[in-house]
Image (cartoon, rainbow, N blue to C red):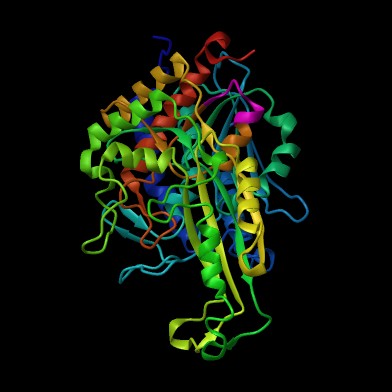
Amino acid sequence: MLYAMSLDLAKTSELIATTWAQELVPQLQEYIAIPALSPHFDPDWEASGHIRAAVDQISTWIKSRPVEGMTVEVAELTGRTPLIVVEIEPFGTPTTDATIVLYGHLDKQPEMTGWREGLSPWTPVIEGDKLYGRGGADDGYAAFASLTAIEAVQKSGGSHARCILIVEASEESGSPDLPAHVDALASRLAGTDLVLCLDSGCANYETVWLTTSLRGLVAGVLSVDIVSEGLHSGSVGGVVPSTFRIARQLLDRIEDVSTGEVLLDSAKVQVPAYRVAEAQGVADAMGADAFERVPLVEGARLVHDDPAHQLMARTWAASLSVIGADGLPATGAAGNVLRPNTSLELSLRIPPTADADAVLAEMTKRLTDNAPYGAKVTFDRAEASSGWHAPDLNPWLSDALEQASQSAFGQSMQLQGEGGSIPFMGMLGDKFPQAQFVITGVLGPGSNAHGPNEYLHLPYAEKLTQVIAGVLDSHGSQSPASTGAA
């Protein structure tokens, strides 16, 4: 066993519980009330001021905490969303001079419709163990929990290496502003050998779920134009082709409409056998519960019946979604008109090891080459972010996570892939190929990030904070050889 815990676990647990109750829950209620939409959804974010308000709130709270050796700044780059950067000097007697990077984001998804009576996106509501409201679970809690874990290590007799906490404001837009910030921080990030990210999910609220892979994302707007203005459908219907029908034809080039299989060669990868076995293990443990809470309408069914197949489909298979549309009037205002334009916003999740740039290039070519009927077809506002595949855990980290999970939850940690994307992980994986990653989070059954009725499971978030404190202390207690530091 490589890890000798130096924390006073009882004191750590008590400190974290007190901070969550007295500090973090009120702060998260204040944060939820800020409609800090990501720049993709609020292009006038500078004028609206909501992102700035969230940055000010979180950075002000961080500055107020009694953490030794801490400096806090808000990094500004022209034309970019701001970045909170918190640097904390080594504490105690760490045996490594490496750097730990902790990550979170403060920008949010749009409101979405369907919130049940008594709930709304910008009104925090506590019901039992759940804090409802947009952004609490995705990912407002992460900055608060990360700093609380560091503070608990310092107050409980532990040690930690140099830490840098980064809180960005464009993650829900694909992190377009982050690469420039990372480049500006390059010298300060040098020596990173451990990355802690709390922006992922869990299959239940009973133990720690370590994320082993994240899908990438390729997105853009497919636009089809056929005439310069709307025309009476009775006069030209059957003569002028419908832009919607042309868009359907184009989508058939990249997706099998009967199965949902993505037809792009660049989006197909060889899945490691051990990841297939991992999914089977989760399926055996969860059974039908894995997707039990999907709110299907009466009579509907999922694409796959087998739980293991379902898990692989959401983590290692490509999937296409049409997430927005222009050119389509509301049904109550639709005239009998052949419309001049149909624009569809496409979101393509791609396997963790697929090359996002290659997928984007193939997708663009298939959608725009040889347009039916000579229509004007474009694929604009494109973005591409590759996924991430976890390196094997070093023995010290595996041991530390197991002990921390047993201490906080009384259960062994579990492994699973995730279907979402966190662009920063791919960036850091490329820059620091020897680094270890702890990607986890609170997005469990029913939490419904991005949708209506999003909630944060408060007891789980508190226990997860304890786990992060244990990992920080473990890292600080290792020899340079065991952490991989030079």
State the image quarter where residue 449 is shown: bottom left
40 up-or-down from 240: above or below: above
Nearer-the-camera pick, 338 or 461:
338
Stretch of the chain drawn in magenta: 429-436
Quarter of the figure with the C terminus: top right
Q: Residue lying at the far right in this picture: please name it.
A: 78
| Residue 91 part of the magenta-drawn span | no
Side of 285 relative to 8 (left or right): left
Side of 253 relative to 259 (left or right): right
Q: Position of residue 187 (x, y in %)?
A: 74, 29
Q: Is residue 201 visible?
A: no
Q: Position of residue 341 (x, y in %)?
A: 61, 75
Side of 401 relative to 356 (left or right): left
Nearer-the-camera pick, 82 or 346:
346
6 up-or-down from 341: above or below: above
Figure label count = 0
Q: Is residue 173 visible?
A: yes
Q: Residue at x 32, y 59 (%)?
A: 126
Nearer-the-camera pick, 209 or 229:
229
Q: Residue at x 60, y 37 (%)?
A: 355
Q: Position of residue 393 (x, y in %)?
A: 46, 20
Quarter of the figure with the N terminus: top left
Q: Residue at x 61, y 56 (%)?
A: 367
Q: Position of residue 224 (x, y in %)?
A: 62, 69
Side of 301 relative to 395 (left or right): left
Nearer-the-camera pick, 213 or 99:
213
